[in-house]
Image (tube, rainbow, N blue to C red):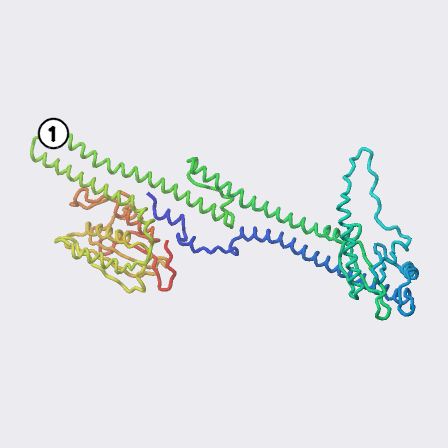
Amino acid sequence: MASATDTARADPEGDGDLARRPLQLAGSRLGGLILALNLLSLLILLVGALLLNEWRRNLIDARLDSLTAQAELLANVLGEAGATRGEPYPALNPVDAALVLRDNFIPVGQRARLFDDQGWLVTDSYAVSEEIPGSALPPARPADAPVPPARDREADARELAEARTELEAEVAAALAGQPRAGLRLSESGDRVVSVSIPVRHVRQVLGVLTLEAGDVDETVAAQRRALMPFAVVAVLVSLLSSLLMHLFVVRPMTRLSMAADAVRLQRARAISLPDLEGRRDEIGDLARALETMTRTLSDRMDAIERFAADVAHEIKNPLTSIRSALETLPLVRAEAQREKLTALLQADVRRLDRLITDISNASRLDAELSRDRPRPVDLGRLLAELVNVYATSARPGEAEVRFAAGPLESALVMGRDGPLGQVFRNLIDNARSFSPPAGEVEVRLDQDDGDPERPLRVQVRDQGPGVPPDNLKTIFERFYTSRPKGTAFGANSGLGLSIARQIVEAHGGRIHAGNAPEGGAVFVVRLPLVRPGQPRRPR
């Protein structure tokens, strides 16, 4: 049979603790580590993306501001030096405008184009400068190298038409007096930073100067290359977190699963993984809980085996006596001897019946304790009702049961009234059986701070011969009985005090026996007290 001690050891904080345990990540070391590592990798990637996007935007804005300043300067020069003051309307001189663009420095990678007031191209910096536009040719391919696929001419034509449309729209907006600056596609299909400024003479728009820089793709590529370290670090952190999860979560869980399978397949009686039990996280808690659970189950199995052996031994004695009496009965001729054997058979049957009843009650005790939920029980009221039942049902010559209550702060205990009542019935019945006729059994309830965890004390005193000092502990063992002379044979099974101890310990209490100085035995039960305002947790 399982003991209450085993049950309490399996859940030392009470079975209500798991329901109350908050799902807080702050109290979870393993969960906090996993979350922190994953958030760190995402944070690194996010910060890098935000910083680089901001830098890219600022870089393009700075490039646009620089081109705008250059374009405004060139437009002012063209408006003064490249414009003719013809009558009645001024107009651009294409030759003078080309000379102005040639004589002014156009940085490498930039292109300046001038359009007249009708949107027609007047001059291009690529045409008047000595620099050859375009990019370097790729290195020559080996003779046996595969020929790269030809470019899609239709796609190239669409890109060229789209680029020209964007340029025309930009020029048209500048001719209307609205400077334009932004990103667009060039005729070569590259993204360029472009600025279009109207060329004015006084207030009249004489043309449009478009200045563009084609290093946007290089800038974006540089930003992508700058983002790579952040991405690599984020990936490494994610890999590290995954590795840690594998090492600290997956592998220990696999080991616990294999250990549980070993227990299930009866290759072991308990799980024992010392390296996991020493951890101070949820895996360690799980390992310790599984070890405690399997150890408790192992102890319970051992207790069941011992109980079965004790039951077999105790049942075998009356059965042997019955068989011997039945074998002897046909050989007896004297009526007095036959009556004696018949009385012996009846006593053995009564003993066997009482034994089987107590064994049945003891075997059901664990199930009853686990099925019945604990609740506050007024121990004073319970004892008063029990004593009242004994007083009303007492027979002549039986010991009187008297109840006395000392000063109490409270008499509430967290438990089950049925099993607790069985404890004190067993103790009172045991005390009455040892008390002399017309004797007295005193049940006293008081509060004693000698045991701070179990201040509520119940004493059951009798006026019998007391308990031999050598038997003060053994009397709580199963099937132990030492009855005074004159007690009816088979009236006691020796399980009453064992059941009482099991119930008391299941309620977090303690029970012990002693002898009073004035004579008689004293059984003391100590139980935890539920104080006013104290959270009531089942144990």
Q: Residues within 10 Å of mark 1 (few under 14, many from 20)?
A: few
Q: Quadrant of the N terminus?
A: top left
Q: Could you say where residue 279 lies in the image, as x and y percent from the top left?
A: 51, 48
Q: Where on the picture, by quarter, is residue 446?
A: bottom left
> Relative to the observer, which residue lies in front, 520 or 172?
172
Please give left or right for residue 142 compared with residue 86 in the image. Answer: left
- Amino acid on which the number 1 mark rests in the picture: Pro
Outermost residue on the top side: it is: 331
Which residue is more in the foreground, 472 or 108? Answer: 108
48 is higher (above) or lower (below) than 323: below
Q: Residue furthest front?
A: 88
Q: Nearer the viewer, residue 8 or 79?
A: 79
- Where residue 348 sits: x, y (%)? 18, 38
Q: Which residue is mark 1?
A: 330
Dot 1 lies on which element? Answer: helix
- Residue 325: x percent and y percent? 15, 33
Residue drawn at x 34%, y 44% as measured from the top left: 2
Name above or below for residue 320 compared with residue 20.
Answer: above
Q: Residue at x 43, y 56 (%)?
A: 20
